[in-house]
């Protein structure tokens, strides 16, 4: 497996809470330069508190070897033409190292945070990706822009706004997915799929991959040649004592995801619908502090990889080797010792089952 990291090494997914280690955009350049020396295959930037394209522009300047990806940028608030331009510039700046990762966001955010009227996400995303590619085709090949779909009609491109061809025009597009329709869209119009962190190997293998393959078949493509990239839920620390704090954090995240209707199918597959409904009720009542107590060890270990620094690399391999092509993982680097530990972990994961 290839291994990628966010610019903040060791950053964890906080659910709805504020992240403990937010990105300091003034340090993005230096962080990327460090990551470029640690053996990682890639750097990703997530759209939460920062513009991921701006962050990756800094990373592109600071790095030479690692790939760069939005994981993910929220698609629908941006016109496809605006996203096409951001990706085009990053691909040029990084000399062909960029992947455009796109996600739909949930309906509440689309309507109440971005002020848009929601539409069914799968068909909307299919049109969005095709519109982006139509703009790229216009710029690279001079094809007249004439894209007409249910959601977008693009038919104007004048020389003033045409950046022209670039050396590496084939920009991969990955789509965030969880439900089968979006997985199918990812296989049909994307180059890879990014499962949500709550997705387990069972859910990916039994639910997501068949839908992804069906989409690829519709488009006459080989799903085995496409990427499946995911940053799983991980609890790790140097020793068992310090690991307990990380476990508490991950219990909280699992409880949050279980309470969210959009992620329910990932819990239904294990017969945990009743637990998810109970947590959803507690969330609506704003009893968030009570929710982690409902995540027992069996549920925790179903949705998260848990282990000390010595164990965690092999545990990630055991769980995801042969299922993912790319896995997101890192730990904090506070000194030379941590740097060597992290580099060893990355090598172990990259080696896969051959590292035993």
Image (tube, rainbow, N blue to C red):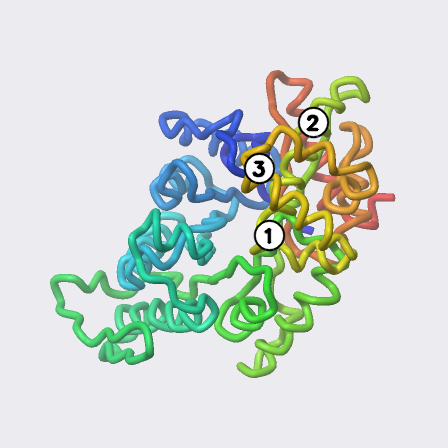
In primary-sequence order, the first of circles 3 and 1 is: 3
- Mark 1 packing: few (<14 Cα in 10 Å), some, or many (20+)? some
Residue at the disc numbered 3: 13
Q: Can you say whether 171 is above or below 68 in the image?
A: below
Q: x and y percent of residue 350 in the render?
A: 71, 46
Separation (CA) of disc 1 from disc 2: 20 Å
Q: x and y percent of residue 11 in the render?
A: 56, 32
- For residue 268, say whether it is visible: yes
Residue at the disc numbered 2: 246
Q: Secondary structure at mark 3?
A: loop
The label on residue 223 is none
- Mark 3 packing: few (<14 Cα in 10 Å), some, or many (20+)? some
Position of 166 with respect to 348 (left or right) is left
- For residue 99, say whether it is visible: no
The label on residue 196 is 1
In primary-sequence order, the first of circles 1 and 2 is: 1
At 70% from the left and 61% from the top, the residue drawn is 204
In primary-sequence order, the first of circles 3 and 2 is: 3
At 52% from the left and 71% from the top, the residue drawn is 185
Position of 29 with respect to 199 (left or right) is left
Separation (CA) of disc 3 from disc 2: 12 Å
Q: Are marks 1 and 2 in contact (CB under 8 Å)?
A: no
């Amino acid at each position: 497996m290839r291994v990628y990291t966010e610019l903040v090494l060791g950053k964890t997914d906080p659910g709805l809470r504020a992240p403990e280690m937010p990105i300091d955009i003034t340090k993005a350049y230096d962080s990327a330069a460090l990551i470029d020396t640690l053996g990682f295959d890639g750097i990703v930037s997530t759209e939460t508190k920062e513009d991921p394209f701006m962050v990756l522009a800094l990373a592109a300047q600071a790095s030479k070897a690692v790939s760069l990806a939005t994981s993910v940028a929220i698609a629908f608030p941006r016109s496809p033409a605006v996203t096409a331009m951001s990706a085009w510039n990053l691909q040029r700046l990084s000399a062909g190292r960029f992947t455009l990762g796109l996600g739909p966001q949930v309906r509440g955010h689309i309507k109440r945070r971005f002020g848009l009227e929601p539409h069914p996400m799968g068909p909307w995303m299919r049109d969005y990706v095709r519109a982006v590619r139509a703009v790229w085709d216009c710029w690279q090949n001079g094809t007249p822009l004439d894209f007409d779909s249910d959601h977008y009609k693009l038919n104007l491109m004048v020389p003033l706004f045409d950046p022209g061809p670039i050396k590496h025009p084939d920009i991969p597009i990955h789509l965030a997915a969880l439900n089968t329709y979006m997985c199918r869209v990812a296989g049909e119009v994307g180059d890879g799929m990014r499962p949500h962190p709550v997705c387990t190997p069972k859910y990916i293998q039994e639910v997501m991959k068949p839908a992804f393959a069906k989409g690829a078949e519709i488009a006459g493509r080989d799903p085995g040649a496409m990427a499946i990239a995911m940053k799983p839920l991980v609890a790790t620390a140097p020793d068992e004592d310090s690991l307990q704090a990380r476990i508490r954090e991950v219990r909280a995240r699992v409880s949050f995801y279980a309470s969210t209707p959009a992620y329910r199918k990932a819990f239904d597959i294990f017969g945990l619908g009743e637990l998810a409904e109970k947590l959803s009720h507690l969330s609506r009542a704003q009893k968030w502090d009570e929710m982690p107590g409902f995540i027992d060890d069996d549920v925790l270990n179903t949705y998260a990889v848990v282990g000390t620094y010595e164990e965690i690399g092999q545990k990630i391999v055991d769980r995801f080797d042969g299922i993912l092509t790319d896995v997101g993982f890192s730990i904090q680097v506070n000194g030379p010792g941590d740097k060597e530990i992290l580099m060893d972990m990355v090598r172990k994961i990259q080696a896969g089952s051959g590292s035993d």
